[in-house]
Amino acid sequence: MALLKTFRLSRFLFAFLSLSVTVGCSSNTPDTPETVPVSGTVSYQGKPLPGASVIFLDSSAASPQTGTLNTITDDSGQFELKSYFGARTVKNGAVPGTYKVTILKMVPPGEMTEDEYEAKVAEADKIVSGGGVLSQEQTPPELKQLIPRKYSDASLSQLEAKVMPDQENEFQFDLK
């Protein structure tokens, strides 16, 4: 009986140690490619464009996760790219290569300001989160695309960025 307990304990320890070595040697993050800093500015009709989505699309990438980089411009129209590799790995910049660029900016329709639109959305969220149903009057209107399709549609955009290693990668997009 004692021999059987010793045998079971030995098997348990062997399994535990094997698992420990396997887990200890494995990595949660795969090797990620090197990136270089990428920044720039976006202006529309001669003025800085705050709150615009700047999308770099690498159509040659094997995975959509590493093939598209997206950032938002700040109040002065400036942006800095970050690359996301899986759920946990973020690096500044982009992998060197050639990217198609699209730029989008959604705005409230008509004469409504962004502050008025945000207030309407907050009011609608409050009603819905309280279990209510929105009337047509309480429903925020659809946002409209400010940027012409020749810049905002990936199939039409002629904007391009060549990200090069060992040099400054700062891009200016002046949209008309």
Image: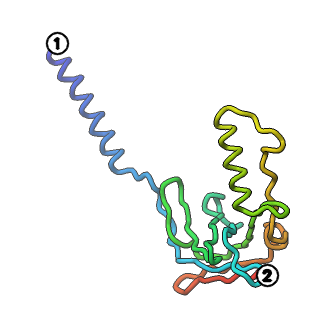
In the image, is 148 to the left or to the right of 3? right
Q: Quadrant of the C terminus?
A: bottom right
Out of 89 and 97, give the one closest to the viewer. Answer: 89
Out of 49 and 89, give the one closest to the viewer. Answer: 49
Pick out the residue farthest to the left.
Answer: 2
Q: Of helix, strand and loop, which one carries label 1?
A: loop
Q: Quadrant of the N terminus?
A: top left
Under mark 2, the amino acid is Gln
Label 2 belongs to which residue? 45
Q: Give me the C-alpha separation between circle 1 and circle 2.
A: 87 Å
Q: Residue placed at 35% from the left, 45% from the top?
A: 22
Q: Is residue 78 above or below residue 13?
A: below
Q: Residue placed at 56% from the left, 86% from the top?
A: 168
Splitting the image into 4 quarters, where does residue 75 fall?
Answer: bottom right
Which of pointers 1 and 2 lies earlier in the amino acid sequence?
1
Under mark 1, the amino acid is Met
| Front: mark 1 or 2 | 2
Label 1 belongs to which residue? 1
In the image, is 86 to the left or to the right of 101? left
Residue 55 visible in the displayed image: no
The colour scheme applied to this rendered structure is rainbow
Residue 20 x/y as whole percent: 30, 42
Residue 94 x/y as whole percent: 57, 72
Residue 79 x/y as whole percent: 60, 74
Residue 9 x/y as whole percent: 21, 25
Splitting the image into 4 quarters, where does residue 159 fall?
Answer: bottom right
Q: Is residue 156 above or below residue 164?
A: above
Q: Is residue 96 above or below residue 18?
A: below
Splitting the image into 4 quarters, where does residue 81 fall?
Answer: bottom right
In the image, is 11 to the left or to the right of 74? left
